[in-house]
Image: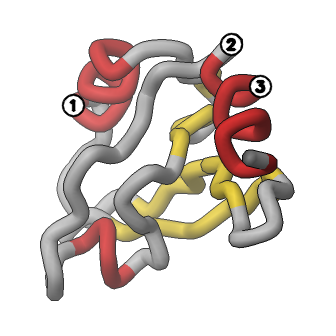
Amino acid sequence: DKSLHALANVLDNHWAILTKVEANFLAEKSGLKQGDVVTKVKTKDIFTGMQLQIALGDILPKEEFEMTYQRIDNEGIVKEFTTKIKFP
């Protein structure tokens, strides 16, 4: 299965996988989906869920920042995206 192989390649380096994305919340509104692998917040490389939590905890209210993430498409190809997010 191409998607499993692609996922294994991504997970070799990153474990900050979004396991749940709530409807109508900031993550969904920013284009993030369940299964996305976060690789960078602002200028910080992210390798673990804990690093992701810490990086997001450092964001100030109303601050806009960039988040980079990877997503595997239906053909098993890993694509990288960057989205701008503004904390409420």
Q: Quadrant for the C terminus, please.
A: bottom left
- Point out the frontmost of discs 3 and 1: 3
On screen, residue 28 above or below 32: below
> What amino acid does circle 1 point to?
Gly
Residue 49: mark in rendering: none
What is the crowding at mark 2: few (fewer than 14 residues within 10 Å), some, or many (at least 20)? few
Q: Give the x, y percent position of residue 40.
A: 61, 35
SS at badge 2: loop
- Quote the CA–CA distance across marks 3 and 1: 28 Å
Is mark 3 in CB contact (under 8 Å) with mark 2?
A: yes
Residue identifier under label 2 = 12
What is the crowding at mark 1: few (fewer than 14 residues within 10 Å), some, or many (at least 20)? few
In this picture, residue 69 sits left or right of residue 61? right
The quarter holding residue 79 reads bottom right
> What amino acid does circle 3 point to?
Asn
Nearer to me, 60 or 78: 78
- Quote the CA–CA distance across marks 1 and 2: 25 Å
Name the residue located 55 percent from the left edge and 68 percent from the top edge.
Answer: 84
Name the residue located 32 percent from the left edge and 76 percent from the top edge.
Answer: 28
Residue identifier under label 1 = 57
> What amino acid does circle 2 point to?
Asp
